[in-house]
Image (cartoon, coloured by chain):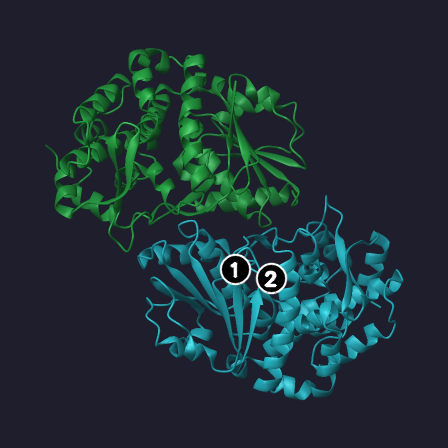
Chain colours: A cyan, B green
């Protein structure tokens, strides 16, 4: 069991460990659970000692991060008679956390939200830091808020039922966290990728805790992404373009991030910012051992999607991290140290994206 | 010309006077105007010295305070290539301000908004204080945020083209402001209702300024409606129920508020909280001179809607100001002094709502 404090405008704690769901304290005021039809049958029962209204259940997957689903969730909160003293308990992966956090931001101009992430990806990344969002036709996460939760409970036991592909995908964000702020974590994972993929609760508690610690440090210093927080977008400008071009939900976010990390490492090597020339290969090897594509070409092959360079470049130019239309990139100096705001010229980007 | 400072988490100024639209300073970053198809042809030209993208135009009226329109506006901001450094300039009445403020809250998790209210109602009320919202099928303003603008410019010249019914309606919120915090304003308006309705710029500048001063005092003390700000809801629990039962947009908000004020005064008289027994009659007379219904029965007659008491009571029980299902009311002690959080028993409410 670990507990990590997040120092935001509204401070809160992230609790990490096996079995936490059965120990949740009763939230103040009327409480509604939001979950999806994959997670709810598996884990909603573990919350049965809490007094809650009937859970709101949405379909699993990225399609639920839509305006239509958001409106439906808000309508169901109203139908449940929830008032301003209410709490929304988001039980599920990143989609549920992003959607639930946004619904809680908006319903009656703000009720409490508690996150119970049930995927590796949401435990190490999306449940911490207060970002919420839904997608627009024009781009991913283009509508959202900053909404700090009351608390986060990451019960690593829920990772035991995660589909292996989803567990693998989560390691995209894990490797990102290591590259941003915990070089030792790379070394720590390398010899035990099998235990990682077998869902070993002790190994996963350690990994989640270390990743949340990296994220806590970053978001505590920069809650609203004015500056330093941008480092968390390592690999994400590429990843969002990949996800958008493939069609939302076609390529898991963590897989796109894994490939985005490799592209960012390659870019850093090209402009000689990267001090450790062995790092791209080392990260590629680790991704391979974790069953993830080691580069963009391998992702093209696996996904059967050509991910054409011009389409990827167009998608990047609207990325919300871009300043006045010219995308900026987070690049790596060495494991554990990144450069947050680098421009890259179009020619270099094009060559990185071109099939070899 | 008047300028009133709002002391919120993000301080800003409300500028009030004739001709302000032609003097707007250029906002920082790329700027998009949001307006409706009634206001844009009349006043978008006055902003033509600003560098902006093509305006986003939505249909006039309450129906545009919807999730569907919000999604469309966000999509158009993306299509215009607006990035995080952008500004949305909301030119129009309360619907445009509420919708535009919410779109600015959400687009890329927050861009700047500048309000240019063009109706009396939005000048004295909705453009100041940072509340944004759209309606849900279950209730009015159920989805929204608190979003403080960068500045507000209330050009009273725009009131010259306001339909007389809309100008009248705005006086519902004006009388509310007087009852909450400016007893002298009632006396000041009483002898010059004709100048008010003729759109006299000097008279209207004075009225808007005094109302904004009342609102500034209240919202500066309580930005997020934790306590004192509730006084601004004087008449609104009744008004929202009236609007919902009649169908959004059927009865203008200010007209519903005017009738809500009378109901609140009557309720205060019934429970002997109201110290000045002549006040309901005096306010009724003033409303009549302004061409507004002097009570609920007169509204029923004018609107041709029966506004049945049981339907109104049901609508009130979901009002977002209710604590755990039992609605609370703002009531008047005397002009300029209100009691923010009074329960009323069901029997009394029913008798207030029953046709005489």
**Whole-percent x, y for residue B317 in the image:** 25, 50
Tell which of B179 and A116 is nearer to you.
B179
Quarter of the figure with the C terminus of chain A: bottom right
Sort mark 2 into few (<14), some (14-19) or many (20+) by Cα contacts within 10 Å: many
Callout 2 secondary element: loop
Which residue is the extreme one toward the left? B356
- Residue B239 coordinates in the image, percent (x, y): 28, 37
Q: Are marks 1 and 2 in contact (CB under 8 Å)?
A: yes
Residue at the spot 64% in from the left edge and 56% down from the top edge: A222
Mark number, residue A345: none
Give left or right: position of A322 versus A198.
Answer: right
| Residue of label 2 | A248
Q: Quadrant of residue B307?
A: top left
Choose between A162 and B296: the one closer to the eye: B296
Do the residues marked 1 and 2 share a common chain? yes
Name the residue that disc number 1 marks.
Answer: A65
The Cα–Cα distance between marks 1 and 2, rounded to whole angstroms, is: 10 Å
**Quadrant of the rendered structure where residue A184 is?**
bottom right
* Mark 1 chain: A
Percent coordinates x, y for residue B177 in the rendering: 35, 29
Q: Nearer the viewer, residue B338 or A150?
A: B338
> Does the rendering let one see residue B338?
yes
B305 shown above or below A139: above
B212 lies above or below A100: above
Residue in the picture at 68% in, 62% down = A232
Callout 1: SS: loop
Is disc 1 surrounded by few (<14), some (14 to 19) or many (20+) residues within 10 Å?
many
């Amino acid at each position: 069991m670990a507990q990590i404090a997040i120092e935001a405008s509204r401070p809160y704690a992230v609790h990490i460990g096996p079995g936490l769901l059965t120990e949740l304290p009763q939230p103040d005021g009327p409480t509604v659970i939001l979950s999806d039809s994959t997670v709810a049958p598996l884990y909603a029962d573990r919350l049965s000692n809490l007094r809650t209204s009937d859970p709101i259940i949405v379909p699993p997957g990225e399609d639920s991060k839509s305006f239509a689903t958001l409106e439906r969730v808000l309508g169901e909160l109203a139908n449940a008679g929830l008032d301003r003293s209410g709490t929304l308990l988001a039980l599920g992966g990143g989609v549920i956390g992003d959607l639930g956090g946004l619904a809680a931001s908006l319903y009656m101009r703000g009720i409490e939200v508690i996150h119970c992430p049930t995927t590796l990806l949401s435990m190490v990344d999306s449940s911490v830091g207060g970002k919420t969002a839904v997608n627009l036709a024009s781009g991913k996460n283009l509508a959202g808020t900053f909404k700090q939760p009351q608390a986060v409970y990451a019960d690593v036991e829920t990772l035991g039922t995660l589909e292996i592909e989803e567990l693998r995908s989560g390691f995209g964000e894990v490797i990102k966290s290591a590259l941003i702020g915990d070089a030792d974590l790379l070394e720590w994972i390398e010899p035990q990728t099998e235990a990682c993929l077998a869902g070993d609760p002790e190994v996963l508690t350690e990994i989640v805790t270390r990743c949340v610690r990296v994220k806590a440090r970053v978001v505590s210093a920069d809650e609203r992404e004015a500056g330093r927080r941008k480092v968390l977008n390592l690999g994400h400008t590429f990843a969002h373009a990949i996800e958008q071009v493939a069609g939302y939900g076609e390529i898991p976010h963590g897989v796109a991030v894994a490939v985005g990390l490799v592209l960012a490492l390659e870019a850093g090597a090209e402009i000689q910012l990267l001090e450790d020339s062995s790092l791209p290969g080392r990260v590629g090897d680790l991704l391979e051992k974790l069953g993830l594509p080691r580069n963009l070409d391998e992702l093209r092959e696996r996904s059967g999607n050509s991910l054409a360079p011009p389409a990827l470049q167009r998608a990047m130019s609207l990325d919300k991290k871009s300043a006045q239309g010219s995308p900026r990139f987070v690049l790596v100096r060495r494991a554990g140290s990144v450069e947050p705001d680098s421009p890259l010229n179009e020619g270099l980007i094009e060559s990185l994206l071109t099939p070899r």
